[in-house]
Image (spheres, rainbow, N blue to C red):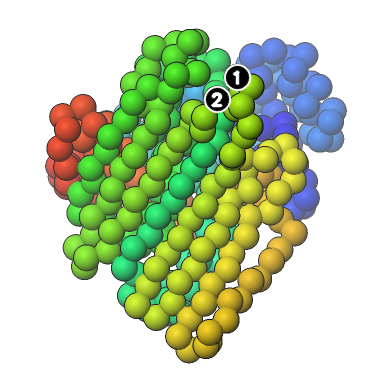
C-alpha cells in the first residue's frame, strides 16, 4: 500500500483522505509520507470518517470478507470497494463477497493489476485490432523468487492463488474463458523450509473451444540463486496468431528497481520486421493507477467496472479448477467449478 498503491494514486492526482492499519504509528507514518489527512489504528474508525467514499482493501484473503461485511454497512455513503486479489480464500467465499456488495449497492472491483501492465495492455490492443489474426498458441514463462508474505504461512497455499492468479486473469483478459484446465504442482524447496505447502511450482494448460492452447510455467524456485548459484530471473510471454506474433517481458521480478515491461511484434501485413514500442512506466507501481481509475470511472458512469467482482468470479473459479486438477490429476472444466453461478 505504501510503496505501490499510494505512490500510483498521488502520481495520478487521486485524493486519498484516510488510511488505517493495525498499528496507528505505522498508519500515521504512511499518512505523513503521502500527505494523507487522517490516520487510524482500526479500519472501523476509518469507515466512520465522513470523507471516505471509496475503500481500498489491502488485507490478507482470510480476513477480507469480514472487512467487506463492515464496509457495506456504511452504504450508500461508501460507494465503492477495490479489493485485493484473491477475492477471499476460494471461489465460494468470492461468490459471497460479490453478493454482499451487490445487495448493498456498492461497486466492487478487484485489484487484478497485471491487466494494467503496459505490455499486457498493448498485447490486448493487438488482439482487439486483429493484427495477430486468430490466436493459435500463447505461453508465459515465469522464473522468479517472490517475496512471500508472512500471512501466507497460515493459508496452506502459495503460488496459484497469490501469483498464478495474475497470469490466469491475464489469459482471461486476452482470450476469454477457457473450456478446461490441466494443472500440475509441486512444492518449492526454498519455501518448504519455512512452511508446508503444495502449490509452489505450478504448470498449467488452458484449452479453448476454438483450438487455442495456452500454457504457463510459474517457477518460484528458479534454481538455487539464493543459495549461491547464478540467477536467471525473468518473465517472458508469447502470443502466436495466424497473422502475427507478439512477445514480451514483464519487469516485475526486478522490483524495487524500476523496470518497464516490453513488447515486440511482427505481422504478415507489416512485412519481415519487428515493431518494438517502448514506454517508461512499469507494472509496479504505475499499473496500480489503472485499477483504482477503473473503479472511479465506473462510479462516475454508473457502470460495472471491467475488473468487477462478477467478472473476477470466473478468475477465482479458474484458480479453484487448477487446485482441483492438481489434486485429482485430471483436466477440469471451468463450468464444473462455476456451477450455476453467473
Q: Total of numbered circles in the picture?
A: 2
Asked if labels 2 and 1 touch by Cβ distance under 8 angstroms, the answer is yes
Name the quadrant containing residue 145. top right
Q: Residue at x 40, y 55 (%)?
A: 139
- Residue 101 screen position, x and y as percent: 40, 39
Name the quadrant containing residue 263. bottom right
- Residue 87 screen position, x and y as percent: 41, 34
Q: Nearer the viewer, residue 96 or 330?
A: 330
Q: Secondary structure at mark 2?
A: loop
Label 1 Cα crowd, 10 Å radius (few <14 / some 14-19 / many 20+): few
Q: Find disc 2 in the rendering and name its residue.
A: 224
Q: Secondary structure at mark 1?
A: loop
- Residue 182 screen position, x and y as percent: 23, 42
Position of 79 compared to 33: left or right?
Answer: left
Q: Residue at x 21, y 35 (%)?
A: 325
Disc sitting over residue 227 in the figure: 1
Position of 37 compared to 165: left or right?
Answer: right
Amino acid at each position: 500500500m505504501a510503496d505501490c498503491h499510494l505512490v500510483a494514486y498521488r502520481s495520478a492526482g487521486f485524493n486519498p483522505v484516510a488510511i488505517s492499519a493495525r498499528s496507528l504509528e505505522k498508519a500515521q507514518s504512511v499518512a505523513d509520507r503521502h500527505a494523507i489527512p487522517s490516520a487510524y489504528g482500526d479500519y472501523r474508525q476509518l469507515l466512520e470518517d465522513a470523507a471516505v467514499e471509496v475503500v481500498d482493501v489491502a488485507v490478507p484473503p482470510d480476513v477480507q470478507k469480514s472487512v467487506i461485511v463492515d464496509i457495506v454497512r456504511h452504504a450508500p455513503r461508501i460507494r465503492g470497494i477495490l479489493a485485493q486479489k484473491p477475492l477471499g480464500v476460494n471461489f465460494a467465499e468470492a461468490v459471497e463477497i460479490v453478493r454482499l456488495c451487490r445487495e448493498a449497492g456498492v461497486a466492487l472491483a478487484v485489484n487484478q493489476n497485471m491487466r494494467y501492465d503496459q505490455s499486457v495492455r498493448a498485447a490486448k490492443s493487438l488482439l482487439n485490432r486483429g493484427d495477430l489474426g486468430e490466436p493459435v498458441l500463447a505461453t508465459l514463462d515465469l522464473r522468479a523468487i517472490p517475496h512471500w508474505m508472512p500471512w501466507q504461512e497460515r493459508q496452506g497455499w502459495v503460488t496459484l492463488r497469490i501469483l498464478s492468479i495474475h497470469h490466469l486473469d491475464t489469459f482471461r483478459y486476452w482470450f476469454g474463458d477457457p473450456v478446461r484446465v490441466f494443472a500440475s504442482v509441486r512444492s518449492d524447496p526454498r519455501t518448504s523450509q519455512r512452511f508446508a505447502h503444495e502449490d509452489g511450482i505450478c504448470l498449467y494448460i488452458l484449452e479453448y473451444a476454438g483450438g487455442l492452447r495456452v500454457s504457463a510455467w510459474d517457477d518460484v524456485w528458479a534454481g538455487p540463486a539464493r543459495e549461491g548459484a547464478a540467477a536467471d530471473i525473468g518473465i517472458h510471454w508469447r502470443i502466436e496468431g495466424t497473422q502475427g506474433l507478439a512477445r514480451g517481458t514483464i519487469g516485475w521480478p526486478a522490483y524495487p528497481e524500476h523496470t518497464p515491461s516490453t513488447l515486440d511484434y511482427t505481422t504478415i501485413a507489416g512485412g519481415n520486421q519487428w515493431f518494438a514500442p517502448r514506454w517508461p512506466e512499469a507494472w509496479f507501481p504505475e499499473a496500480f493507477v489503472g485499477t483504482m481509475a477503473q473503479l472511479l470511472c465506473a462510479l462516475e458512469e454508473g457502470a460495472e467496472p471491467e475488473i468487477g467482482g462478477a467478472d473476477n468470479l470466473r478468475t477465482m473459479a479458474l484458480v479453484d479448477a487448477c487446485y482441483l486438477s492438481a489434486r485429482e490429476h485430471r483436466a477440469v472444466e471451468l463450468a464444473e467449478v462455476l456451477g450455476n453461478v453467473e
